[in-house]
Image (spheres, helix red, strand yellow):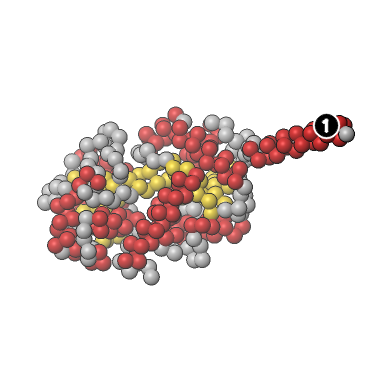
């Protein structure tokens, strides 16, 4: 009787040990594929390559991180590829940003929604900004909003994304928060990039610029541009801490163009947690802080369930606003 009891105890201990190793000791023992859903040279490509290098430098994996460029449909080709062909691949990460969420919210990826993947984390952001030329009569965001409340079409905006894109939505978010009711008649002109849009504003041809902080720094330093508001929760770190936030002006518009990753939906919870923990380690590293300093990325970090909740809320906000102004039905 004692022998049987002892054997059972030993067997239970062995099984417990094996379960502990398989459940709690997930390790990424092979090389990782990072999909950049665009051609080389863009923001998603940068995100994959820089994060991949830090992951390798920190020895978080035994192999390497290979960047795989997969352009098409503003990220839609890569999203469909992951959902359709690699939904169980735990050695796969995909670079994403607010642009990804915007397209999902506006249902631009046919038959796809945010629930088809798992949102791993964000490791930095380029915050939205609203700026005007140095000779503009507007000196605060409140001045500009007041003019729009009187006549929504009186202020013309220029941005580097298409109509209905993230730059356009930043203006609509700020206007709605400021009490502008005629959102459909706000004038937004789309240019091929932020630089072209800024040239028009600095030249006095268009009233205001909507884009990201990184795009305006050169014009700000030359004195050709006035930043009316940064769309962040708090003021940015020095040397940009003199720029006012929209919140300080009673306009609760926060618009981070975050940089982060999603991973396939059907990987194990343990593999998902490994990705979350790894991105936490990357963000806390001196190597990543140096990348942020050189690239102009600002502090912004959410992982795991916190990040998923943030993405869900961002999708709801963008979808509701896009519906209100007739961008989607």
- The quarter of the image holding the C terminus is bottom left
115 shown above or below 224: below
100 shown above or below 134: below
- The quarter of the image holding the N terminus is top right
Residue 207: x percent and y percent?
A: 18, 56
Residue 52: x percent and y percent?
A: 52, 39
Determine the residue positioned at 32% across, 66% down: 324
Dividing the picture into quadrants, the one containing residue 156 is bottom left
**In the rendered image, is residue 62 in sight?**
yes
Residue receiving disc 1: 6
Q: Residue furthest top?
A: 286
Q: Residue furthest bottom?
A: 329
Tell whether 234 sits left or right of 224.
right
How crowded pointer 1 is (Cα within 10 Å; few <14, some 14-19, many 20+) is rated as few
Please tell me whether mark 1 sits on a helix, a strand or a loop. Answer: helix
Determine the residue positioned at 20% across, 47% down: 249
Determine the residue positioned at 32% across, 45% down: 127
Dividing the picture into quadrants, the one containing residue 168 is bottom left
**In the rendered image, is residue 99 in sight?**
no
Residue 178: x percent and y percent?
A: 22, 55
Tell whether 326 sits left or right of 291.
left
Q: Residue furthest front?
A: 1
Determine the residue positioned at 14% across, 47% down: 139
Tell whether 79 sits left or right of 133.
right
Residue 235: x percent and y percent?
A: 27, 39
Residue closest to the eye, 197 or 151? 151
């Amino acid at each position: 009787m004692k022998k049987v009891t002892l054997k059972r105890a030993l067997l239970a201990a062995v099984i417990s040990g094996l379960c502990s190793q398989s459940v709690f000791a997930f390790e990424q023992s092979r090389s990782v594929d990072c999909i950049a859903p665009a051609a080389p040279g863009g923001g998603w490509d940068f995100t994959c390559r820089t994060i991949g290098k830090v992951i390798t430098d920190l020895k978080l994996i035994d192999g390497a991180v290979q960047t795989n460029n997969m352009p098409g449909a503003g990220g839609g080709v890569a999203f469909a590829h992951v959902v359709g062909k690699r939904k169980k691949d735990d050695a796969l990460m995909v670079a994403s940003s607010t642009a990804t969420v915007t397209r999902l919210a506006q249902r631009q990826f046919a038959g796809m929604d945010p629930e088809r993947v798992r949102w791993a984390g964000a490791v930095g952001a380029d915050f939205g900004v609203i700026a005007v030329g140095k000779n503009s009569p507007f000196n605060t965001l409140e001045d500009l909003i007041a003019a729009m409340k009187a006549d929504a079409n009186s202020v013309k905006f220029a941005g580097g994304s298409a109509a209905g894109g993230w730059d356009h939505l930043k203006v609509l978010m700020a206007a709605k928060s400021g009490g502008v009711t005629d959102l459909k008649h706000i004038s937004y002109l789309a240019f091929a990039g932020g630089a072209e849009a800024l040239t028009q504003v600095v030249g006095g041809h268009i009233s205001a610029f909507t884009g990201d902080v990184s795009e305006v720094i050169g014009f700000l330093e030359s004195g050709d541009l006035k930043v009316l508001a940064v769309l962040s929760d708090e003021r940015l770190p020095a040397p940009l801490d003199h720029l006012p936030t929209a919140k300080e002006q009673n306009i609760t518009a926060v618009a981070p163009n975050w940089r982060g990753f999603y991973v396939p939906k059907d990987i194990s919870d343990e593999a998902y947690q490994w990705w979350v923990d790894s991105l936490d380690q990357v963000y806390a590293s001196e190597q990543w802080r140096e990348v942020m300093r050189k690239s102009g990325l600002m502090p912004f970090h959410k992982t795991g369930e916190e990040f998923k909740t943030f993405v869900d809320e961002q999708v709801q906000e963008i979808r509701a606003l896009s519906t209100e102004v007739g961008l989607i039905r």
